[in-house]
Image: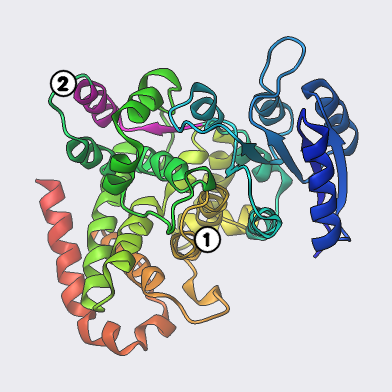
Amino acid sequence: MKPYSLLFADSDTNILNGHRRIIKALKPAWSMAFASTGREAMSKINTMRPDVLISELNLTLEDGTDLLKAVQQAYPEIIRIVLSSEPDGESEVILRATQSAHRFLAKPFKGELLVEQIEKAGNLRNLLNSSELLEIIGGIPYLPSLPDLYYELIRAIDEPLISLSEIGDIIARDVSMTGRVLHLVNSAFFGLPRKISNPQTAVVMLGINVIKSLVCYVKLFFAAPDIIMPGLSLDKLWLHSSMTAQLSKEIATNFHAPVNVQEDAFLAGMLHDVGKLLLLEHPRYYDKVLQALSGMDEKDFSEAEYQVYGTSHAEIGAYLLGLWGLPDPVVEAVAYHHRPSRLKFESSIVLISSYLANALLSMADGEKVKIDSVIMQNATVSQLFNEWKKQAESLYRESAV
């Protein structure tokens, strides 16, 4: 693995010197550059193109443009980590940064934690082999939400007697809103002792004011546009994701998995196709895949993706979720939900559950799916497979009513 190149940006030179000592002691092979103003940082980025930008929260350019936003727009492939001493999670600058930062760290922090964050974000790049895709993903500030749910959420937060639990229920039904809320609550800025996979729990922890700000001010959620793209139905994608989440959690329950694993399984099922949402504004990607798909005997969208790009929406979605700091078992399950045997170690319950849920629901929809032979060797899977298949068929029938 090649050494990372880092750019630290902070108005406090003492803090910059501290970063220099930490990285030099822990990772002497990594290269570093330092900037004390937004203008200086942007100048050095133009010259060196670092792998990672580690920036103080509120640095701006001469025209008042936020440094993080400017880097996102000009060099979206750069991993962006925010360091903040801001004590208020409802702060306007914190919420605005959620649009353009991949990860957050609250000051003070241990050097080992910073190195871990950099390495985790950097290692995710191994999932993708295209600089074009890295740029596409890095430049996306938000994901579209299903219009009906979006407007339901808008109405709900204006209700004076609405409960956080009710708001959490709405968010839990939507792929992109779930991802964004968990991105924020799982950031190191909040310093929680464990990763949160349950969107209802995340809403309770964030509070109504943060949710209102995310919806109304920062606009991290927005209604999906009317997109006409052959082979892709947003309504169908959201419905499939919701059913996959339900069945995935049920399968994990049948494995007698603990509650946190069941929640991870639900989340992996909900987010397994999030990579398709990321690519909505890039029809060229879909055009190439659909062209390859037309020449294949057996129509398999993901295999057409691998043929054209050497990667798929699975790895693309996992890359973003990993940058956002979602739980590792969820990222792993999303990444390998089409090719679980590619994982170099034993599959987790989360991966098995979400993989089977997706596969069985696709079969119920009439698709030809070959179940992974390694997963079928699992004793619990072989024993309960037909029962899960019936549950998938039942869910699919109910959805068609």
As shown in the figure, which amino acid type bears the numbered disc 1? Glu
Res 303 label: 1
As shown in the figure, which amino acid type bears the numbered disc 2? Pro
Q: Position of residue 253 (x, y in %)?
A: 22, 72
Q: Which type of secondary structure does the marked residue at label 1 adopt?
A: helix
> Which residue is painted at 15% across and 67% down in the image?
391
Residue hosting label 2: 160
Dominant secondary structure of the magenta stretch?
A: helix
Q: State the CA–CA distance, disc 1 to disc 2.
A: 49 Å
Magenta-highlighted residues: 142-157
Q: Quadrant of residue 62?
A: top right
Q: Quadrant of residue 151?
A: top left
Q: Is residue 234 left or right of residue 398?
A: right
Q: Is residue 12 left or right of residue 58?
A: right
Camera sees residue 224: no
- Mark found first going from the N terminus, 1 or 2: 2
Camera sees residue 144: yes
> Which residue is painted at 77% across and 27% down in the image?
11
